Image (cartoon, rainbow, N blue to C red):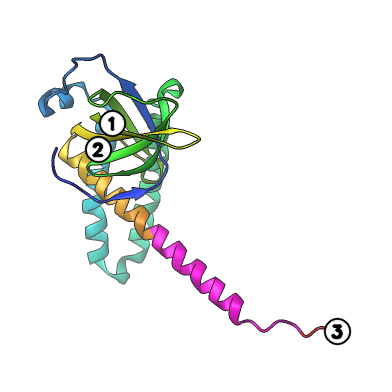
Amino acid sequence: MSEQFFSVMHSIPVNVEPLPAGSEAPSLVALEAELPTPFRIAGAISHVDVGTARQLRNMGDEFGVLVDVINQQSAKIDVLLSYQLSQQDDPAQRRYTQRFGGSELVFANPQPLSVGTLLRLKLFLTDQASAIYCYGQVVDNSADEEAVFITVHYVALRPDDQEVLVRASLSIQSQQLKQRAEQRLHAARQANTPSAPSIE
C-alpha cells in the first residue's frame, strides 16, 4: 500500500497482535474471508451511512422531521454496533494511537518492535461507531521518556475501510481546527475585556 494519506494526531484504541517472523500479509480476498462479522457489519453500515448522508443533504429543509427520525434511528444502530465492536477489543492487546490516517498509524508501546514485524490490527473508531480489521508492518521506532512510538504502514486493508479511516481523520482534524479557532476567539475576547477598576 504505497499511496500516502493525511494522518491526524489523535488517540484511539487499537489492538496490536505481533505475528511470528516470516508471516505474510493476507491477500484482500483472504482478508475478506477472515474478517470477523462485527467488522464486516461496521464496514457495511459506514458505507450505507455515507450514501444516506448525501441523500439527506439533498432533501432540503422541508423534510426536517423525516431527517430527524432517520438520524434518531441511525443513532440507535450506532449504540448497538458500538457495543458489539467493544466485545472485539482485547485489553491484553490494547494500545493507543498517537496519530492515524488512511495509510499509517503510530501507537505507543512499552518496548520497540523489530522493523518488518507483521501486525494484526483492530482499530476502534468509537466516535464514528466503526472499527477496522487489517494488517500492518512496522517501519520505524522512536522513543521519549514515557513510551516507544511504533510507526506502522498498512499492508492489507480493504479499500472501503481505508476510505473510513480517511474520512475519520479528516473529520477529527476539522473538529480540532474548530476547537482551536474557538479557543483563539475566546482568548482574544478575554484580552480585549477591560478589567474592573480597582477600589482603593
Judge left or right: residue 181 versus residue 189: left
Q: Are marks 1 and 3 in contact (CB under 8 Å)?
A: no
Q: What number is the disc on residue 43?
A: 2
**Amino acid carrying mark 1 in the image:** Phe
Kindly identify which residue carries mark 1. Answer: 39
Identified at 19% across, 16% down, the residue is 23
**8 above or below 119?**
below
Q: What number is the disc on residue 156?
A: none
Residue 23 is one of the magenta-drawn residues: no
Instruction: Single out the mark in the foreground, 1 or 3.
Output: 3
Residue 188 is one of the magenta-drawn residues: yes
Magenta stretch bounds: 175-196
**Amino acid carrying mark 2 in the image:** Gly
Kindly identify which residue carries mark 3. Answer: 199
Q: Do the residues labelled 1 and 2 touch (CB within 8 Å)?
A: yes
Instruction: Single out the mark in the foreground, 2 or 3.
Output: 3
Quadrant where the C terminus is found in the figure: bottom right
Quadrant where the N terminus is found in the figure: top left
Identified at 11% across, 25% down, the residue is 27
Give the camera-side residue of 173 and 88: 173
Quarter of the figure with residue 177? bottom left
* Residue 48 image point, x, y percent: 23, 46
Q: Is mark 1 on a helix, strand or loop?
A: helix
